[in-house]
Image (cartoon, rainbow, N blue to C red):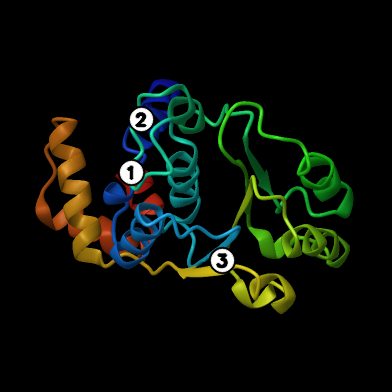
Amino acid sequence: MSKEKAAHQVLARKYLPQGFDEVVGQPAVSQTLKNALATKRLHHAYLFTGPRGCGKTTSARILAKALNCAKGPIAEPCDECTSCKEIALSSSLDVLEMDAASNTGVDNVRQVIIETVGLAPTRDRYKVFIIDETHMLSSAAFNALLKTIEEPPPHVVFILATTESHKVPATIASRCQRFKFRTVPADLLAGHLSEMAKKEKISVEPAALELLARAAEGSLRDAVSLL
């Protein structure tokens, strides 16, 4: 069982999208972000909303790469420079990820964001803060975050991701450029699983792939886990 679990983890990591064109089922979001990067029309705060497992956090990391790529800001990060590689491995000192589901309090926001936001990036162009499940933050934490989002330093970019956008205070949401992620259609999920199975040299009947796609209920992450 341990070998199966290890293989499953490798499969999920192996096919994690590294560019906007690899994100399945979110063409409008991906194209809009690419256009913004290509024209250098960048915002200081983004709000990614939508169901779980549809690419919000993955797209946040790709956006962070695009902003800090040695060739960037660029619509297609090179995936070869030190910055791209470190962000892909979640080891970049200038891209800080915070899971609000387990760090809900004002002290967490103060420690991770408030105390570091004024510091210049260690090496890269931007200091990027990715806050997952943003709606889980406490009222005090939101208030502390608001002051920073209102007047952030020019080298700071916030990317907030949430499955429950209605719980994000309007004072925060109104200062963000909002992107709505949607559930991935079953046919796209089945096609993606089919391509993945071919690359892994796994024989899977089309009917089985369709069953997995329906069971995933629009979540790419769940579909890959089921496969």
Q: Quadrant of residue 121?
A: top right
Which type of secondary structure does the marked residue at label 2 adopt? loop
Q: Position of residue 208 (x, y in %)?
A: 18, 53
User: Residue at image x 60%, y 68%?
Assistant: 176
Q: List x then y, in percent, for residue 82.
A: 46, 22
Q: Is 149 left, or right, of 94 in this rendering?
A: right
Could you classify mark 3 by the number of other residues whose Cα lies within 10 Å: few (under 14), some (14-19), or many (20 or more)? some
Q: Determine the secondary structure under disc 1.
A: loop
Tag 3 residue: 163
The answer to which image quadrant residue 91 occupies is: top right
- Residue shown at the point (82%, 47%) measured from the top left: 114
Q: Earlier in the sequence, mark 1 or mark 2?
A: 1
Label of residue 19 in the image: 1
Q: Residue at x 50, y 57 (%)?
A: 42
Q: Position of residue 16 (x, y in %)?
A: 36, 39
CB atoms at circles 3 and 2 under 8 Å apart?
A: no
